[in-house]
Image (cartoon, rainbow, N blue to C red):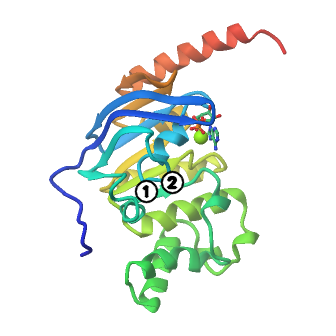
Amino acid sequence: MGAITMNNANRTIEFERVALRRGETIVFRELDLVLSERRIGVLGDNGAGKSSFLRLFNGLLLPESGRVRIHGLDVRENRRDLPRRVGFVFQNPDHQIIFPTVLEEVSFGLREQGVAPREADGRARDILGANGCATWIDAAVHELSEGQKQRLCILAVVATNPDVLVLDEPFSSLDLPTRLDLMDMLLTLPQTLVLASHDLDVLTHMERCLWLGGGGVERDGAPGEVIAAYRGHAMARRNNMGTC
Ligand SMILES: Nc1ncnc2c1ncn2[C@@H]1O[C@H](COP(=O)(O)OP(=O)(O)O)[C@@H](O)[C@H]1O
Ligand SMILES: [Mg+2]
């Protein structure tokens, strides 16, 4: 056990008057949220702030003002420890993968947690084998397709067993069978899942959805209701776009 332990009784994620600016853009003006569900979906147009929102979960970004607390831990005060507690799957696998081989990429996170190298390699083989990667466990990362890289990134983070799993459009390069397979796997996990996606089918599996836009949350609620509202917005926007 490290010096800091998650307060397991407190499984909530709190955003309190969070303001964030990136460049000239005010991404969040005064975001107030209390999230206690285990499956949270995030949607919104390009540039709405989905990636920025997720990056506030583990200190990749800090709010300009306000507070973010993950299971009771203030992100600003625990910035160094949070990446171990909050697993982050990047939208672009090339921003995540650091090792030349598939096995090393998954094994590394386990070794970092103090698992002996042989045991870590064994566990990495098990998780890769159990999730459709048996034939390329010993491959070099540069030999993989984009979809295989995305699958690898998800599994590498899941293997470290974080308290919260944050995934930024993790399925964009995946074919439908792989997407369904990984989604099933993710839904069996006990962790809190926060997932940004343009795939509205995927979002129907969440307990709560947040539609981000306009410097905050446009709509917050059950997936059916939020997705329907977002579809309405998308249709209206499309009609207003005219022809290019
Ligand atoms: N590195 C950056 N520098 C300046 N502005 C940025 C940067 N990253 C994102 N932004 C701006 O912040 C806003 C939110 O971006 P982002 O969180 O990436 O949205 P989304 O993930 O929903 O597409 C956008 O207007 C974008 O242009
Ligand atoms: Mg994004």
Cα–Cα gap, marks 1 and 2: 6 Å
Disc number placed over residue 181 in the picture, else none? 2
* Above/below status of 112 relative to 25: below
Direction from residue 103 to residue 216 in the image, left or right: left
56 and 195: which is toward the camera: 56
Direction from residue 46 to residue 32 in the image, left or right: left
Direction from residue 212 to residue 45 in the image, left or right: right
98 and 175: which is toward the camera: 98
Q: Label 1: which residue?
A: 185
Q: Quadrant of ligand 1?
A: top right
* Above/below status of 70 relative to 118: above
Amino acid on which the number 1 mark rests in the picture: Met
The C terminus lies in which quarter of the figure? top right
128 and 150: which is toward the camera: 150
Q: Seen from this angle, which residue lies furthest right?
A: 244
What kind of element bears circle 1?
Answer: helix
Classify mark 1: residues with Cα within 10 Å, few (<14), some (14-19) or many (20+). few
Q: Position of residue 205 (x, y in %)?
A: 41, 38
Q: Position of residue 152 (x, y in %)?
A: 58, 65
Q: Position of residue 44 (x, y in %)?
A: 54, 28
Quadrant housing residue 123:
bottom left
Asked if the beta carbon under badge 1 is closer than 8 A to the nearest atom of ligand 2, the reply is no
CB-based contact (under 8 Å), mark 1 and mark 2: yes
Give the residue at x 23% y 49%. Answer: 11
Amino acid on which the number 2 mark rests in the picture: Asp
Give the residue at x 41% y 54%. Answer: 165
Q: Seen from this angle, which residue lies furthest left?
A: 9
Direction from residue 62 to residue 100 in the image, left or right: right
29 and 164: which is toward the camera: 29
Q: Position of residue 86 (x, y in %)?
A: 39, 58
